[in-house]
Amino acid sequence: MPKVLVSDPIDQVGIDILSQVATVDVKTTLSPEELIQILPEYDAIMIRSGTKLTKEAIEAGKNLKIIGRAGVGVDNVDVPTATRMGIVVVNSPEGNTIAAAEHTIAMMMSLSRFIPAANQSLKGGKWDRKSFTGVEVYKKTLGILGLGKIGSHVATVAKALGMRILAYDPYLTAERAEKLGAHLVELEIVLREADYITLHLPKTKETHHLINADRLAIMKDGVRIINCARGGIIDEVAIADAIKSGKVGGIALDVFENEPLEAESGLRELGANVILTPHLGASTEEAQTNVAVDVAEQIRDVLLGLPARSAVNIPGLRPDVWQKLKPYLQLAEMLGNLVGQLAGGRVDTLNVKLQGEIANSESQPIVVAALKGLLTPALRERVNFVNASIEAKERGIHVTETRDPSVEDYSGSIHLTAHGSQGQQSVTGALLGKSEIRITSINDFPINVAPTHYMLLTLHRDMPGIIGRLGSLLGNFNVNIASMQVGRRMVRGEAVMVLNIDDPLPSGLLDEVVHIQGVTDAFVVKL
Ligand SMILES: NC(=O)C1=CN([C@@H]2O[C@H](COP(=O)(O)OP(=O)(O)OC[C@H]3O[C@@H](n4cnc5c(N)ncnc54)[C@H](O)[C@@H]3O)[C@@H](O)[C@H]2O)C=CC1
Ligand SMILES: O=C(O)C(=O)COP(=O)(O)O
């Protein structure tokens, strides 16, 4: 049974799903050193934001096949290292959207009405109403930085509260923003005009310290800022100074540059207009059930050899799409392997052409499968669906994609052309029925061959006697021929012959094949 490590608190429903297929160890207090020490034992790990999967930790996880993040942000995972190692990283992109958006609204209302401080004062024995006169959000301007899933829900709720919404998101269309009742504007306009600013961005190089002293300076005096996205998007020193100077009227932070927030952090010292929560955005019963189910199911599926639906480092596939594409993925992989072996040396360019009924399908998984096949002879089990693209890129293989829905020889077919140091080779393959794989052309010579483990291919002149000579040569070396096919475009012209053979070709025999009169080239292929 595979082993799964759960290193952050996850809802029991997730553990139950994992237990269907794996031995599950729940260890939520591991130090980074302990994690590195035990990670080699595990096939999968399920985490939240608490566990840091650094380069060193992932490299220690020699047997890891999947990293499951029960939540959205994967900034605590070194995804490039996981990708290079062929480890699929999955998350739950929507499971906690509502929870995080509602926490944001709660933070905004708490900032406006001093609810945490008033509560603390009352419980401290006082009846102080004067200190806690708040402001209304009605008719105020809310600036949303990052109008993705959480930002969009915040916009919808804020709109219902009567707020005017400005949004900054360079990757979004103005139409989408207008549909949500938000005006998409430049960052500077949001900063200058908003009474409240809320962040809903991923943490990236570009968003690091997006809110810094210079940007705080151009904001409205008394602006209130909420961050339920990621620590480090706001410069904590700059914002603390802006609170102290009175430039900023209030801040509500759920996330911090360092988590857990240091005991001695200056943020803890600030007054009633600073609200801090310990990364609670996703902490609702509903969200925790959602993300646990979502991610545990994906880990289970990947351990069973099925695809993940929301992988962040390979194209995720819905089960119904995968069912449809699966035989084509196998076909593409076989063709990639075949064309790579025919090309022999270094391949510089691979063209993947989708024909007939699959011309309109999602192409990326098919391209990845072809690359996996192409790289398999060189990389063996080191290459998989996760790292095939990156490995190809690192080897300088340029991939192009074309589509031709008008090709109707078969319902759907894949044509690969490889250009490399030894010239150009091309192969086509199709499915017979729903899943039987056929090679249907080699270098544009039509054939119809079911691929087998060992094959011998020749390029030759179509002339009497050549098949007999090849047959007796193989017979002399005790190589059994299972089947044979010849493809030609014209009588006595160039032709291709494919022999399915039961045994590997003895060494030296290929040279003799090439020396048969009329044979111009020959290849041994092992699939
Ligand atoms: N506090 C908590 O417990 C939780 C925090 N989060 C965090 O909230 C953030 C948002 O999550 P989602 O809305 O689910 O993500 P999302 O991917 O749906 O939305 C992010 C949006 O930010 C935009 N964006 C990316 N780079 C940008 C840039 N440089 N400038 C402006 N916009 C940019 C994207 O176009 C996208 O629309 C993430 O950082 C996530 O980790 C998510 C769930 C819970
Ligand atoms: O989903 C996210 O991005 C979150 O920040 C939630 O983090 P958590 O799973 O509660 O540690």
Image (spheres, rainbow, N blue to C red):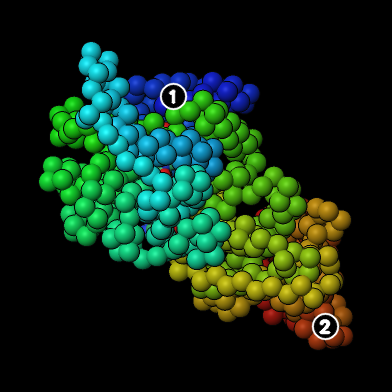
Q: Is mark 1 on a helix, strand or loop?
A: loop
In the image, residue 500 sits, relative to residue 46, either above or below, namely below
Q: What residue type is labelled 1?
A: Pro
Q: Is residue 33 visible?
A: no
Residue 496, image x and y in percent? 77, 75
Q: What residue is disc 2 on?
A: 489
Which numbered marker is on residue 9?
1
Q: Is mark 2 on a helix, strand or loop?
A: loop
Q: Position of residue 461 (x, y in %)?
A: 78, 83
Dot placed on the residue nearer the N-terminal end, 1 or 2:
1
Viewer-side residue, 322 vs 396: 322
Residue 423, quarter of picture = bottom right
Of residue 131 and residue 291, the one placed in the foreground of this image is 131
Query: In this rendering, would 443 be left or right of 97?
Result: right
* Location of residue 293 (image quadrant): top right
Along the viewing direction, whichever of 462 and 155 lies nearer the viewer: 155
Q: Ligand 2 lies in which image quarter?
A: top left
The kind of residue on which mark 2 rests is Arg
Question: Which of the two marks, 1 or 2, is nearer to us in this view?
Answer: 1
Which residue sits at x=17%, y=43%? 243
Are the residues at dot 1 and dot 2 in contact (C-beta closer than 8 Å)? no
Please determine whether, in this image, residue 374 is positioned above or below residue 462: above
